[in-house]
Image (cartoon, rainbow, N blue to C red):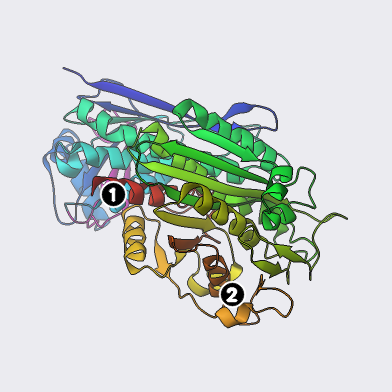
Amino acid sequence: MKMLFKLSRLVIGLTALTCSSIAAAEKITFETSVSKTTDTLVVFHGKNQSNMIYEKYNKKANGQLDKAIAAINFKGNYGKFIEILAPNNLAYQRVVIVGTGEKTLSKDKLTKLGANLSAKLEKKSISNITIAADDLDGSNAETSALLAHGISLRAYSFDKYLKEKRQEKNYYFDVSDGKAATKAYLPLSYIESGVFLARDLTNETGTAMTPVEFVEAAKTLKKYGVKIKVLTPKELKKLNMNALEGVGRGSLHGARLIIAHYEGNNDTPIVLAGKGITFDTGGYNIKTKNMVLQKKDMGGAATALGTVKALAMMKAKVNVVAVMGMAANMVSEKAILPGDVLLTAEGISVEVISTDAEGRLALSDAMWYARKNYNPEIMIDIATLTGSKIGAVGTEYGAIFSADDQLVQELTFAGKQVNEHLWRLPLGYKGKLKSDIADLRNTGTGGPGATTAATFLQHFAGDTKWAHLDIAGNALIKSAKDESPKGATGYGVRLLTEWILTREKQ
């Protein structure tokens, strides 16, 4: 019996007033014996290996696949491609042979392989592709699902403002058990929805994505059973959350604290605290370069919200709260000034040495609120926090800071499974944060900037098990790579979802 399942996922974008479809992911179909006529066939060939599916097509093509491999000395190395046009006796315009390296591929390599296949075919004038997925690992449904996951992640595009929209491609996976592959792919498609939400929010312009619009984005998660709560500037002041309120003071709409709570069980919750600076001018310490990129400074909040969406859509049996401190850091007569002192809800006073070190101010009150109201088992904050992080570990890794070795190990391992890698940096240099007129400065007097920023946040973690993820340079990239297209990446959604779901199984 033919097993057929098609997923057509729409990437949802936000305008100032409404939600609208702005881009479409690929159509993914899992089918036992593909009946659809397609223009391209994809087969896999391992290093110095062959397999039954490959041999079947090679025989039909009178050995043309083998000849092509021999002509260029193709070894089947992982991620290498051969393209053969108009192969003999095959009803395809082209055959793409994909090198797999070793016979068994880990889940991260399978996802990356799918992503790079998607990139390879993106600019081709083709629309229908058959993938002989059983080449990879027999009837293993997860193998096909992960390959499809990588294809879809890379195919995302933000074309809301483009006259010519990207046309989706149709991928037909020829698998042994279409029903099993469909079941394996479904939770991955939910993770994609979370990633795409984070990408949409981060790619949007600063004018169209203010804290008010972010609130509306969060409210769309109510249909998945997520509880949404929003604190306005007046309510923030009443709670003495003067650090978060102060960052948004110079903008038209002011700051917001957004809480998105998915309660899939009654366990003590995990908190994801996200930095949500929807646009960062630097305030009176105004930025002098790359200001066009500062719409990405809410990437941490976007990741936190996207993670909650993914978990809620799959109805995971977890209790997760995203607490997002939202503000636009603008210049006006109401904006905070260098040298001002803000009293945080924690009761710690902070001298504002730089108005461009605003993210840690917004997070300090968000972390306090999370501890006071949810008493979490673990708190992870995620933020595009410092340029110093890029200087320390570049853009291939996110930086992780924590005093808890086990938590660092768990998050780092989860990152490896989904190609979102972390590198540990030290906490310390507390003396660099001393102020003459307040309890803390918001920037250190010298010392490693990423570390002093993380150490500042440590003051607001209390006794809660805590880690800080600095994703500066990860949330938005200038060139496409592997699962991430150019622009916003949604970095952290897959990492955090993987980590939370792994903990659920233990």
The spot of residue 385 in percent (x, y) is 58, 62
User: For the residue labelled by badge 1, is the local secondary structure a helix, a strand or a loop?
Assistant: helix
The spot of residue 252 in percent (x, y) is 80, 44
Q: Which residue is mark 2?
A: 449
Q: Which residue is mark 1?
A: 502
Q: Is residue 436 above or below residue 154?
A: below
Tell me if residue 127 can be seen: yes
Q: Is residue 494 magenta?
A: no
Give the main secondary structure, helix, strand or loop, of the magenta stretch.
loop
Considering depth in this image, is 395 or 50 the residue closer to the camera?
395
Q: Is residue 75 magenta?
A: yes
Considering depth in this image, is 195 or 29 the residue closer to the camera?
195
Give the residues in magenta.
Answer: 74-102
Residue drawn at (50%, 68%) of the image: 394
Specify which label sits upstream in the sequence, 1 or 2.
Answer: 2
Tell me the crowding category of disc 1: few under 14, some 14 to 19, or many 20 or more residues within 10 angstroms, Cα based: few
- For badge 1, the amino acid type reads Thr
In the rendered structure, the answer to whether residue 100 lies left or right of residue 472 reads left
- For badge 2, the amino acid type reads Gly
Could you tell me if the residues under marks 1 and 2 are in contact, i.e. CB atoms within 8 Å?
no
Please tell me in which quadrant of the rendered image residue 364 appears.
Answer: bottom right
Considering depth in this image, is 31 or 247 the residue closer to the camera?
247
